[in-house]
Image (spheres, rainbow, N blue to C red):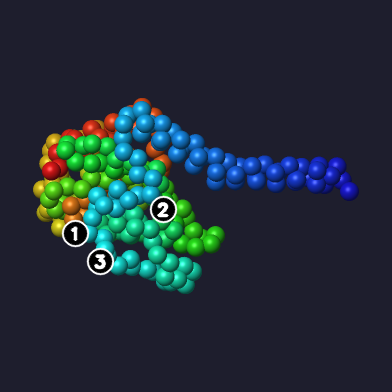
Amino acid sequence: MSDIEIFVLNILPWLFLLLVVLILIQTFYYPYKRRNEILQMVKDRSFEYDKEGNSLSNYIGNVTTFVVKRNFFDLVFKGFEKETSCIVALASTGLNLFNRGHSKKAKNIFAISFEGKKLFFFDYYFTVGSGKHSTRYSHTVALLKTNSFLPDFYMRPENFFDSVAAIIGFDDIDISGFENFSKIYYLKGKNPDSVISFFTPERIMIFEQSPGYYVEAANNFLIIYSKSIIPVKKDYIDKIVNIFKGLKVE
């Protein structure tokens, strides 16, 4: 047996142990650490912590008649397992984010006072696909229930593939006179005229100055979320609150 083979055999157990440690850190330590950071922030700033998601469910409201749509994967691998009331409530908003994938979870939920209403924050997880072809998504979401219905739209940072898609005719909604905004964000909606009316110059300026967010509206719900989980820092809440304030949705 060569020296290289002996070295490999000696190091394999340590590599396996390192892998186990990394998995344990990812699975248990990081979620535990984040939860404690959220709890400390909630305590320091007198926010309302919603451990089970009941307050969020009640805030969304009107979920008793909502039927969860299950795709083929859900029926085969999960059967008719009931979603938690919080996940059902989120799906009932009509927002696309909450109707994607399976194995959905909402964690670290809390609410703050905002313009005489509540603004909810939470970490949201879901999986698309199965087995080795599955992808787990995680976002930090801020959700506001408005007093009036909003145009149905989806907005995200624009990327290279959007430019390619535009060449072959798959255009998003471009707003005349705001070319920079159209370069920064990809915008789609069921009724383009209503979406364009919603994006006033003041609202466009807000998102030009705050690039990188994902935004969705449906019925009377509006969400702003990140590509991934946002670290708990001093401006963790304030940046998103300022965006909502600038949008001036009633």
Picture coordinates of residue 179, whole percent (x, y): 19, 41
Judged left or right of residue 141, residue 250 is: left
N-terminal of the two: label 1 or label 3?
Answer: 3
| Residue in front for this viewpoint, 85 or 191 | 85
Secondary structure found at label 2: strand
Can the viewer see residue 187?
A: no
Residue drawn where x is 75% and y is 45% of the image: 13
Which of discs 1 and 2 lies nearer the camera? The answer is 2
Secondary structure found at label 3: loop
Residue corresponding to mark 3: 65
Residue corresponding to mark 1: 190
Number of residues whose C-alpha sits closer than 10 Å to that of mark 2, classed few (under 14), some (14–19) or many (20 or more):
some
- Which kind of residue does numbered mark 3 sit on? Thr
- Which kind of residue does numbered mark 2 sit on? Lys
Picture coordinates of residue 39, whole percent (x, y): 41, 35
Q: Which mark is residue 23?
A: none
Residue drawn where x is 44% and y is 58% of the image: 103
N-terminal of the two: label 1 or label 2?
Answer: 2
Q: In which quadrant of the rendered image does the C terminus lie?
A: top left
| Residue in front for this viewpoint, 172 or 239 | 239
Residue drawn where x is 38% and y is 58% of the image: 84
| Residue in front for this viewpoint, 203 or 186 | 203
Q: CA distance from mark 1 to mark 3?
A: 25 Å
Judged left or right of residue 187, residue 18 is: right
Residue corresponding to mark 2: 105
Q: Quadrant of residue 249?
A: top left
Judged left or right of residue 10, residue 152 is: left
Picture coordinates of residue 123, whole percent (x, y): 39, 45
Q: Is residue 151 above or below residue 212?
A: below
Q: Quadrant of residue 204?
A: top left
Can the viewer see residue 191?
A: yes
